[in-house]
């Protein structure tokens, strides 16, 4: 588990993103969003992020740290593009805090958190224990739209059950990994999980 956890999790995240946007990619390619530049560009950057995540975690699995470090700047640039394209979509689509559904409000917090965690991951690139947790947990914070769209396409359960269940399982799996690899729960792990729920409380009750 120590060697394959982050690679396996990255592959699962990529698979979920493909399933979530399978209509855009395979079954309904003529839909309006597929001809909208802002969605196309944003989608390409997001898929690039997940692909880089898989490649990077595989380099670590193989012990190729030098190549992993060289590719790091590409990951940082991709993350910046994901963040900027997401912010642009938020600005264009949503007209004020009160007009947003609670899950959109949550994503308004999660996307900056993703950007912050990727930056912290890059700053901690020579501290492997912190680096991989920042990058992985940062990615978990951008999962909302992917899980919402994947719900029902994997198993026939409502999005209200599927999304929180899968999201929590990813966090719980990191708790288990921490316990197996460190014999304790790392502060990045549990503080991120606490922040995850703080955001939902803010989003639901404001």
Image: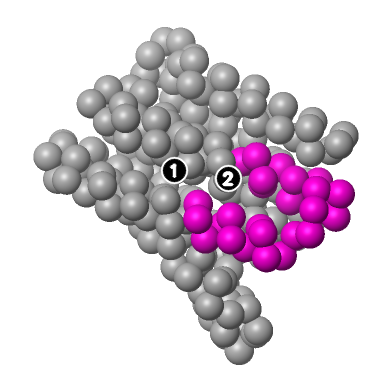
Q: Residue 9 carries which label?
A: 1
Please identify the quarter of the rendering in which residue 132 is found.
top left
The structure residue drawn at horizontal position 71% and vertical position 65%, both measured from the top left corner, is 93
Q: Position of residue 85 (x, y in %)?
A: 52, 60
Q: Where is residue 76 in the image (x, y as percent from the top left)?
A: 34, 47
Mark 2 and mark 1: span between their CA atoms?
20 Å
**Disc 2 secondary structure class:** helix
Q: Position of residue 199 (x, y in %)?
A: 71, 33
The structure residue drawn at horizontal position 51% and vertical position 23%, both measured from the top left corner, is 189
The structure residue drawn at horizontal position 65% and vertical position 84%, both measured from the top left corner, is 32
Q: Quadrant of the C terminus?
A: top right
The structure residue drawn at horizontal position 51% and vertical position 41%, both measured from the top left corner, is 114
Q: Is residue 25 above or below residue 190?
A: below
Camera-side residue of 178 and 196: 196
Instruction: Magenta stretch: give its range.
Output: 83-110
Q: In the shown orientation, is residue 36 left or right of residue 198?
A: left
């Amino acid at each position: 588990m120590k060697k394959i956890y982050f690679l396996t999790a990255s592959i699962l995240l990529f698979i979920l993103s493909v399933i979530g946007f399978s209509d855009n990619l395979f079954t309904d390619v003529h839909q309006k969003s597929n001809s909208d530049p802002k969605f196309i560009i944003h989608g390409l950057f997001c898929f690039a992020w997940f692909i880089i995540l898989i490649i990077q975690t595989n380099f670590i699995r193989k012990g190729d740290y030098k190549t992993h470090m060289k590719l790091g700047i590409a990951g940082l640039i991709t993350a910046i593009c994901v963040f900027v394209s997401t912010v642009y979509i938020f600005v264009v689509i949503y007209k004020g805090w009160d007009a947003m559904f609670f899950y959109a409000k949550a994503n308004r917090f999660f996307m900056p958190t993703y950007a912050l965690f990727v930056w912290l991951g890059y700053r901690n690139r020579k501290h492997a224990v912190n680096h991989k947790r920042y990058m992985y947990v940062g990615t978990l914070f951008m999962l909302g739209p992917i899980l919402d769209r994947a719900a029902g396409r994997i198993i026939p359960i409502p999005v209200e059950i599927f999304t929180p269940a899968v999201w929590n399982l990813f966090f719980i799996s990191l708790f288990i990994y921490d316990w197996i690899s460190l014999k304790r729960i790392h502060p990045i792990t549990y503080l991120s999980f606490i922040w995850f729920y703080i955001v939902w409380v803010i989003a639901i009750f404001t």
